[in-house]
Structures are given as structure tokens and as C-alpha cells.
Amino acid sequence: MNINLIVNLLLLLSLLLPLPVSSDSTATYTMAFPRSKNDFSRQLIEPVFVEAFKRAGAELNIISCPPLTCSIYVKQGKVDGELLRAMFYKHKLPGLVAVDASIYSITFSAYSLKPLIMTRTEDLAMPELRIGYMRGLFWLDNELRRIGKHNHVTRFDHWNTGINMLINDKLDVLLGIQHTIEHRLRENNHNSVHRLMNLKTIPLYTFFNQEHKDFAKKMESVYREMKSEGIEAEIQNKIRNAN
């Protein structure tokens, strides 16, 4: 057979065959999240967000960091965004793009060992109260600033620090995310600590750096689809059952 004919046939065949797809063709987004792999709430919600990114044609890589460190990583461009933050977070870092849909909410609550009676956030303004909460929780920052308590609180880097301070009478009131605090209290059999009041339930949103604004729109559609499937209620039920 003519060699040139064979070469031409092979060339034609190569044009007709689909090109091999590299495993690198799927974009991977590295997102900061202030929960370690061992945190029970992360274990419950991570599969949901992995599925969400998968529906958008991407892979999710989560790195753990304290809330304030997560903000620094985003600002420095070391990550592609933050997985979950309150919407007013965009005022802290205006260069970020929020996914305008939410499938996860948290409740901020107040806890104490003492028989205090509180029904509203303003009750925390009492001068003698020793209040503590975890750094990087901007909603609490704003609320305590609003009632004039912002400069008279203790901030710490880990939930366990705050719980230990409360147990050892170094705090009168511990503020934080309800399901996280109550899970840790049960883990350590701190049955004497009680919830004083719920402060507010807020939806959390995913934030991306500006360069990923098109993907943020895609994620918005995915989140709305998943919300219509009842995924938010499913997550909350799992958290309640775990507690």
C-alpha cells in the first residue's frame, strides 16, 4: 500500500477521534472555611457543598483556618474565596463577589453558668458582664459595637478556649454559633451551662474573588436548585439530630 495514503488515512482518523480529556480540565476551587476536618458541622455540610461544586462542573478543595486568618488568606489571594460567610462580610472585603443564594444558616446564641435573665441583645450591654466570643465573627462584632460593648469583651481563637473560660468563671457570658457550642458542651459533659437566649439566625453565603465572578453566577443557579430540593432543611435536621 502507498505510504502516503497510509499517512493521510491515519491523519484523517486522528481528526475524527475525540481528543483525550485531561483530569486537569476540571477547575478546582480552594475555599477557606473556619472548621477543621474533625468538626462535626463540617462533616455534615461538606458533602453538600462538594456536590454543589460538582453540579457546577468543578471540584472543591477546603482549607481550614480561624475566621480572621481565612479573611487574610482571601485578601492576599491565597485562596479562591470563602465557603460560608454572612452577607455583610462583603463590606469587610468589598473586592469579593457573593453567590446571591444560600443553602445554609446559623444561629448566634448566648450561654452562661449563671441564672441570668436575658431576652434581647441590649441586655448584654450591662457594664459588669464579662463577655467572650471567637475572633472573626463579624455579626457579633457589629452587634456589640451597636450596644457599646465592643471594647469590653474577650476574644479568643478557638471555641474550647471560650468554653474553658466560662467553666472556670473567667466569663459570665459566652457568645457564638449555637450548634457548634452546644455540640462541644455535650462532648465535654458541661451540663451546667445553659442557653440564655438566641440572638439571631442568619443565612451564610459563598464568596469568591473577583476573577471568579462568572463561576459565582453559576453557583447561584446550583444553590437555588438545591434549595428547591430541600437541601437546607436536610442539613439543619442532621445538625439537630447530631446534637
Image: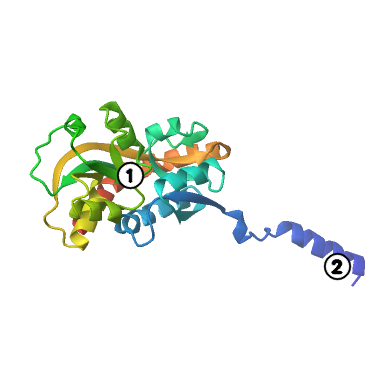
What amino acid is labelled 2 in the image?
A: Ile
What amino acid is labelled 1 in the image?
A: Arg
163 shown above or below 155: below
Secondary structure at numbered mark 2: helix
Q: Is residue 234 visible?
A: no
Q: Is residue 47 visible?
A: yes
Q: Nearer the viewer, mark 1 or mark 2?
A: 1
Position of residue 38 measured from the top left corner of the image (x, y, whole percent): 35, 62
Q: Residue at x 14, y 52 (%)?
A: 193
Q: Which residue is mark 2?
A: 6
Comparing 81 with 234, the one in front is 81
Position of residue 151 measured from the top left corner of the image (x, y, whole percent): 32, 33
Comparing 148 with 53, the one in front is 148
Between discs 1 and 2, the one toward the N terminus: 2
Comparing 172 with 50, the one in front is 172
- In the figure, is residue 131 to the left or right of 156? left
Q: Which residue is mark 1?
A: 155
159 shown above or below 141: below
User: Image quadrant of residue 4?
Assistant: bottom right
Secondary structure at numbered mark 1: strand
111 shown above or below 217: below
Position of residue 12 measured from the top left corner of the image (x, y, whole percent): 79, 59
Q: Residues within 10 Å of mark 2 (few under 14, many from 20)?
A: few
* Residue that sits furthest to the bottom in the current view: 1
How far apart are labels 1 and 2 at the CA level?
Answer: 75 Å
- In the figure, is residue 58 to the left or right of 184? right
Q: Residue at x 86, y 65 (%)?
A: 7
Comparing 19 with 210, the one in front is 210
Q: Residues within 10 Å of mark 1 (few under 14, many from 20)?
A: some
